[in-house]
Amino acid sequence: MIDRALIGCSADFMRVVHAARLVAPTDATILIQGEAGAGKETLAREIHALSTRWQRPFLALPSASVTPELFDGSAGGAEAATTLHPAVGGTLFLDEVADLTPAAQARLLSYFETGRVGTNGGEVLSLRVIGATATDLLQRVEAGAFRADLYHRLNVVPFDMPPLRQRAEDIPLLLRHYGRDLGRALGRRPPSFSVSAMNLLKAYPWPGNVRELRNLCERLILLLPGVTVRPENLPAEIRAPACSRGASGFRLPAGGIDLNRLEADVIRQALDLAAGNRSRAARLLGITRDTLLYRIQKHGIA
């Protein structure tokens, strides 16, 4: 079962959703960055559904499976004919574009430059491309592992999908959504959550993001249908105190701190480490680029 709903109300999440809805009616190429399980494909499907191509197919492919022949319409073209042609006029979603082989990168770049597949003229293949990655693609470019020209072709409109740990206020909404849909599919009543259990869920860092939350919701529906979930019903990793999950162990000095000065100093350090690249600095800080830009403006950082 594939979840295709964008659920949330947090500021970082809604900024991404609003921007995506503005770009959706255009044919601009999009690159969605974010951690595994954060909802990159869900965002891509929303963009497709709101585009002028909504009546055509949405084709999702793992980039590791993309061969140069996929974009080869001249040498027999069997793979292009069977895989890409049914989706002509629709949207091609390439998941984890960092996994594209050098040869596949070259063929995809050729498609961007000519609008055609294959060599010797090839044939026109109208597809909107949306790429996604959980990898720092610019870092791969700098390391020589990804073509800079292809990166710039993909990165026309970039989106940073915020991780679930930055969207704690969205967790009750997501649980309600998954509880309703999965409960209906499984023929069971979804459980409710005690205040203490919900607080634990909000405090947990969710390394698997929305996908991990959905899996937990399905497990609880199967094992505890219709009951109130309490802390003892949650997995051990969620019940564990933050310090045992690798918390920094920071202790507030007796004399206190200047929080604004500390935040500004940390942001400057992140920008220095990222050589001024704001997207990379945001990832170092575990926040979205929009949040970083807001805080840069707030502190008047040049």
Image (tube, rainbow, N blue to C red):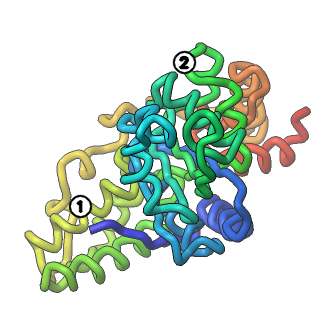
276 is higher (above) or lower (below) than 230: above
Q: Secondary structure at mark 2?
A: loop
Q: Residue 297's spot in the image, x, y percent? A: 86, 46
Labels in figure, total: 2
Q: Which residue is mark 1?
A: 216
Q: Residue 56's spot in the image, x, y percent? A: 51, 71
Residue 21 sits in quarter: bottom right
Q: Judge left or right: residue 233 versus residue 20.
A: left
What distance separates the C-alpha of mark 2 from that of mark 1? 36 Å
Q: Amino acid at mark 2?
A: Ala
Q: Amino acid at mark 1?
A: Leu
Q: Residue 173's spot in the image, x, y percent? A: 43, 75
Q: Nearer the viewer, residue 218 or 149?
A: 149
Quadrant placement of the C terminus: top right
Res. 63 visible in picture: no
Residue 27 sits in quarter: bottom right
Q: Judge left or right: residue 67 versus residue 122.
A: left
Quadrant placement of the N terminus: bottom left
Q: Residue 233's spot in the image, x, y percent? A: 15, 63
Residue 213 sits in quarter: bottom left
Q: Which residue is mark 2?
A: 145
Q: What residue lies at 90% left-to-right and 40% top-to-bottom? A: 300
